[in-house]
Image (spheres, coloured by chain):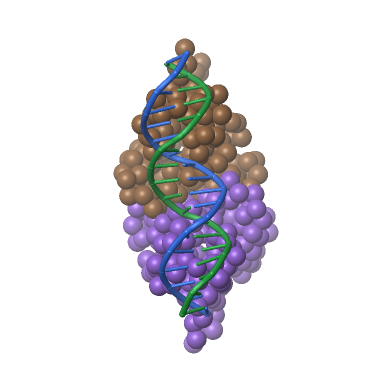
Chain colours: A purple, B brown, C green, D blue
Amino acid sequence: MASRSTQILEAAARVIARRGVRGLRVEELAEEAGVSTGLIYYHFKDRTGILRHTLEFINSRAERYTAAQDEAAEPLTPREELDQVLILELQDTPEVRENSTAWGELRASAVFDPVLREDLARATLAWVQEVAGLLGQVEPLAPAVGLAASAERLTALLEGLSMRWLSGGLTIDHARTLMADAVEVELARLRQA
Amino acid sequence: MASRSTQILEAAARVIARRGVRGLRVEELAEEAGVSTGLIYYHFKDRTGILRHTLEFINSRAERYTAAQDEAAEPLTPREELDQVLILELQDTPEVRENSTAWGELRASAVFDPVLREDLARATLAWVQEVAGLLGQVEPLAPAVGLAASAERLTALLEGLSMRWLSGGLTIDHARTLMADAVEVELARLRQA
DNA sequence: GTCTATATCTAGATAGAC
DNA sequence: GTCTATCTAGATATAGAC
């Protein structure tokens, strides 16, 4: 089932979570995946290729665990879905940790690497729009600009909280509480405006 | 006036802003500073030493430009000071960009480097407490836990917005608007609670 | 204190056997 | 497809002259 390529990409996600994108060494990846470096270069062109495919792999995996809720037994209300999208990213499970770490690395790398910016901007935009859409479902009377601004703040806050959590400055529970309160605050604001 | 060490550290700040902490190469630093690599190793033990001193240098520089306002002609109201502390970090000047970049790098590196976490946690705590104190001056009736939570959210949001700005996903003006609105929203919340 | 030249070391990448 | 062995490049760090 899981092909060799997939096995290597899963290992790469673990190594990135441990060492970061820029700390990933091909030799360590080979060890983690239980294969030789030679095999890695058989499956991927070069280190950059490994990175690109891993980021892609992680991205599709994130969509999967976000989407998984939609297909579950009982459909969620917009409000529940909003909480899911924002708060599911603050979970201390290996997969979420790997994804958050990789996202943070991607963000940090993009500061110095123009090539990465495009991918990142596209993914961010989609995410912001998703959140804005959900906010609009929860508060149908709120103006579009307000929804967009709230979505930008909430997603940016999530990134900030996520980094603090990953860098050990915040417990996951505290981060979730802060995030949940922020959602309340933004919704209250949208209700008033 | 500016010693050789300082000259090298200033150059290091510029290189870090351009390449990141992990992208800093000693040879490029030497070129930027207009000295030889040998001289750099005369002044600093090794690459890690350069990094540590540069981060320290940047940190003290950031305190200086934040504190500079306090000693200016007219004393600021707590509210003005609050805006200054939070919004001064969103400025497109070389120095602020260098500091923000370095801070983002420090945060991102700390995810993988336990040694950096302590410094970072200490600096973050001081910053959060400073903001909480200012919020308390603006809204004296607000409870301490509320002040702390608001300060944590505002500083985490600032980090998130700053990273988006640096990675090209947000204009500086838009980031400032979002930040300014967040301050309003948090103050409104503190007033109600 | 400062430079030039160079040794050393690490990590990415390839060749060739199986 | 997969491994072992190895080449190579890039970057850190040192030696020694001035």
The residue depicted at 55 percent of the width and 64 percent of the height is: A50
Placement of B36 over or under A162, stated as above or below? above
Q: From where the camera sits, is residue A11 visible?
A: no
Q: Residue visible at 35% across and 61% down?
A: A173
> In front here: B143 or B166?
B166
Residue A153 placement, left or right of A26 = right
Horizontal side, residue D17 vs residue A131: left or right = left
Q: Is residue A181 above or below residue B79?
A: below
Q: Position of residue A39 (x, y in %)?
A: 50, 71
Q: Position of residue C4 (x, y in %)?
A: 53, 25
Number of marks in picture: 0
Q: Position of residue B20 (x, y in %)?
A: 52, 42
Residue placed most toward the observer, B106 or A154: B106
**Residue at image coords 57%, 68%:** A44
Counting from the top left corner in percent of width and height, residue A88 is at 46, 68
**Nearer to us in this view, A179 or B121:** B121
Which residue corresponds to the image point at 68% horizontal and 59% vertical from the top-left? A144
Query: Can residue A7 be seen here?
Result: yes
